[in-house]
Image (cartoon, rainbow, N blue to C red):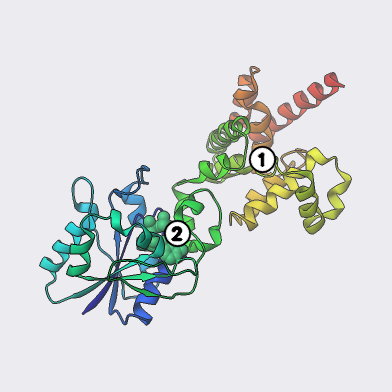
Amino acid sequence: MKVGIIGGSFDPIHYGHIQIAKTGLQKLHCDEIWFMPTKSTPLKDRILTSDVHRLAMIQRVMAYDPRFHVCTLEMEREGKSYTIDTVKTLKQRYPDHEFVWMIGNDQLTQFDQWREPETLTSLISFVCVDRDGQLAKTQYPIQCIHMEAMPVSSSEIRKGNKLNYVPYSVLQYIYEHRLYIENFIAERETQHRYKHSVSVAHLCEEMALANGLDGQKAYYIGLFHDIAKNMDKIHLEQWMDAICPENKKWAIPVWHGFVGSEIVDRIFYLDDPQIKNAIYHHVLGDDHRDPYAMIVFCADKTDPLRGYDSTHLIDLCKADIYQGFWAVKNENDKYLEEGK
Ligand SMILES: Nc1ncnc2c1ncn2[C@@H]1O[C@H](COP(=O)(O)OP(=O)(O)O)[C@@H](O)[C@H]1O
């Protein structure tokens, strides 16, 4: 049996990895593809997402093709993991299999940094699949083959970019387990606003749970509520023209609610209508029926990081969001009146 191996951190797995797997099946005529997640990568010093989460995300992709498998050999090994040890173990355990180790060309260019590269290529064959349309040259006996370009990397995904390259079931897992997502916000907001967003997210969650509602949904509303706040006026206006030109009658500081509600859906694939609705209304606080819209309005105004004592209002919202909402709204109106 011919087995194509794809080793990597898969933090998270994405369509680039899946494309390599398909190329292995189609062009190298592999019978199976084994995804080999590393425990910790010697060439990368970043702390990886836990083995359990990375493995669970890979498992979700296994359903794509019965020939896809996960091999946890490297994860099970203690300490740092080197490919040379893996290859030796594989050959020992599966003497009848023919293995092909598939790498992207970013790996090819740093192949001399792998431990014992000459021994490695003498033990099994290595194939490089083109990652960015430019097959790299190498001094090693490594065959290079072309594959359809998938311009994505896990690091971009961890920043919340190119989420369309993440299988939907994996993205669902990411949201269910809150992986990377505070980073999505940190990448797009100032440090000050990022802290506010995280604080509002936790407050929204607490208020929702206290009212018998979905804490996770409320957390996401709070986390993303200001996602469009840093956008410059030109881009903000382009979004407004595209999605709701009729709302341009409102002052510009109000627009980020309308635009944010589209961004969570179109860029972050949070397509829940209640999440969109709550973000849409959070600036004006003009949805008096949906509890999630009320929660984010109240949490935004009573965020402890704002520096005033909002404990009584938070307690009111936790006891009953419908009553709490009007108390927060009245206080807010009073505050705005005084500021005039
Ligand atoms: N978009 C892509 N196209 C082709 N190969 C890729 C792509 N992304 C990753 N690879 C290859 O997949 C393997 C595993 O990479 P990994 O470290 O998990 O992902 P990433 O490079 O995205 O962080 C490596 O050999 C890498 O070169």
- Residue 282 in the figure: left or right of residue 316: right
Instruction: Name the residue: 56% across, 53% down.
Output: 161
Number of marks drawn: 2
| Residue 249 at x, y percent in the picture | 89, 46
- Residue 46 in the figure: left or right of residue 279: left
Instruction: Name the residue: 72% across, 47% down.
Output: 280
Give the residue at mark 1.
226
Q: Does 191 appear above or below 110?
A: above
Q: Give the SS element for disc 2.
A: helix
Q: Quadrant of the N terminus?
A: bottom left
Amino acid of disc 2? Val
Amino acid of disc 1? Asp
| Residue 131 at x, y percent in the picture | 45, 66
Q: Quadrant of the C terminus?
A: top right
Disc 2 within 8 angstroms of ligand 1 (CB) = no
Instruction: Name the residue: 52% across, 37% down.
Output: 209
Q: Does 25 appear above or below 196?
A: below
- State ligand 1's quadrant: bottom left
The disc at residue 301 is: none
Q: Does 259 appear above or below 308?
A: below
The disc at residue 170 is: 2
| Residue 77 at x, y percent in the picture | 19, 51
Disc 1 within 8 angstroms of ligand 1 (CB) = no
- Residue 314 in the figure: left or right of residue 256: left
Question: Residue 25 lies in what quarter of the image?
Answer: bottom left
Is residue 57 shown to the viewer in this render? no
